Amino acid sequence: MKHPLFTKLAALAGIIILLLIGLGLIEDVVRDRQRYRSQAAAGVAASLAGPQTLLGPMVHSACVESWDAETGKGEERRLVEQRREFLLTAMPEQLQLHTGAALEERARGLHKVNTYTLKAQIAAQWAPLASLQPQATVKGSRMQCGAPILMLAVGDARGIRSAQLRLGEQQLALKPGTFHPTYSRGLHATLPEAVRGQADGLAVTLELELVGTERLSIVPLGSRTEVQMGSRWPHPSFSGRFLPAEREVGADGFTARWRLTSLATTAPQDIAQGKPICETTDNALEAYAPPPQAARECADSFSVAFIDPVNPYALSDRATKYGVLFIALTFVAVGLFELMSRLRVHPVQYLLVGSALCSFFLLLVSLSEHLPFGVSYALAATACVLLLGYYASHMLGSLRRGLPFGAGMALLYGLLYLLLQLEQTALVVGAVALFAVLAAVMVLTRRINWYGLSTPRPEAA
C-alpha cells in the first residue's frame, strides 16, 4: 500500500467505534441493574412500608353552615336550604420531635435495601384554639361543627407499629385514619368539645413507632418547630427545603437538629389549604430546590435518606464513563511503543487490547453484586492487568517491554479508583492526570518526523 499509516489510522478508527459500541452496551447493562435495584426497593416498600412523611399533629374540625334562601318569583317563590362545608384547622405553636432510627437491611435477590424503625416522642402545644370557632358568612345562618379531631398523618400507614397519645394526664384512644380530605393516611383521636374554648390552649404528647424504607421526611408544621434526630447509620443524606442547623456525623452514627420558625416557611398555611407536600429528589448530594411556581404549589418539608454511599451500580456507571479515556490512553501507549521501538502492531491486536479493557467494566459490575466494591475492583483490575501485561510481552516482542506496559495499566486502574472515591476533587485530579499524560506523550515524541511516517514506502522491484 502507498499510504500504510493512513490505512492503519482508518482501521484504528473503526476499532474504536466498535469498542464504543461495546462500552455503550455495558452501560446499558449497568442501567438495567440499577433499574432492577429500584424495583427491589419498590418491592420492599410494597411489602413493608414506603418512604415516610410525618405531618402533624394538628387539630381540625369539619363544619357546615346552612341557611334558607328564596328562589323563584311570585307564586313559585319558595325557600331552599343552602349549605357551605368547610374545614377549620389549628396548627401548633410549639412542635418538638425527638426521634431515633434503627436501621435494618432487607434484600430482594441480590439487591439490598435499607429499612428503618423510627421511635419518636412528639410534644405539641397550641395557643387558645380561636381558629376552631366557626364564623358565619350569612346572617341568620345555622352552624354545625363536628368534634375537634387531633390527627397525625404519615406517608404509609402500614408502617405504624404503635402509638400512644396523652392529653395532660389523660390517655386518649387512637384510631386509624385522619378524617382529613387531603392527608387521609395516619391516625386520629377525638378531643373533648371543651377544648374548643379553652383559655389556656392545648398540650399533647405522642409516642410513635414507625417503620419505613430509605427516607424520612418531616413537615415543619409549628410556629416553632424543633427536631432532633439520631441514628447509628453513618451515611445520612440531608435534603429537602431545610438542612440541619446542627449536625454531627461520625463512624458510629449521626445526630442532627433542625430549628425553624413560621418566618422561614409557609408550611402551616399551605397545609391548612390542603396543598401537597414537596417531594425530595433521589440525589443524595443535592437538596431539593423546586422552581418558584412549584414552591408555591406545595408545602415545605425536610428529609433524611439512609443511603448506602458505596452503591456498586452508581460507581460502576461512573467508571464506564471513563472507558473512552482508558481506550484512548492505552492505544496511545501501544502506539508509542510501536513508534519508539520500530515495531508493527496489527489492528487486530489493538482490537483485542481494547476488548480486554471493555471486559474490565463488565467484570466490575458483575463481581460487585456479590462482593464489596473495593474487592471487586481489585479482582477485576488485577485480572485485566495480568492479561494485558502477558499479551503485551508477546505483542511488543519482549518481556522488557511488556512489564512497563502492565505497570502503566496498573497505574491507570489505580487512578480510576482514586477518581471514583473522590467526589469534590475528582475533576481537578482527572484534569491534572490527563495533562501529565499529554505532556509525557509530547516529550517522548518531540523528535519524531511525522511527515516521514506518512511517506509511502518504495515498492519492491
Image (cartoon, rainbow, N blue to C red):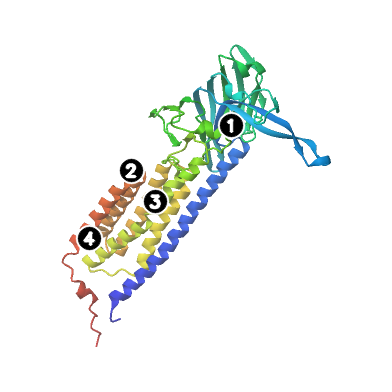
Report which residue position mark 2 lands on. Answer: 424
Report which residue position mark 4 lands on. Answer: 441
Report which residue position mark 1 lands on. Answer: 154
Q: Give the position of the C terminus as an image quadrant.
A: bottom left
Distance Cα–Cα, label 3 vs label 1: 39 Å
Q: Is residue 431 left or right of residue 290?
A: left
**Label 2 is placed on what type of residue?**
Gln
Where 5 sits versus 429, above or below?
below
Closest to the camera, between mark 2 and mark 1, is 1
Q: Residues within 10 Å of mark 1 (few under 14, many from 20)?
A: many
Query: Which secondary structure, mark 4?
Result: helix
Q: 457 or 460, which lies in front?
A: 457
Q: N-terminal of the two: label 4 or label 2? A: 2
Which residue sits furthest bottom? 461
Visible residue check, residue 218: no
Q: N-terminal of the two: label 1 or label 4? A: 1
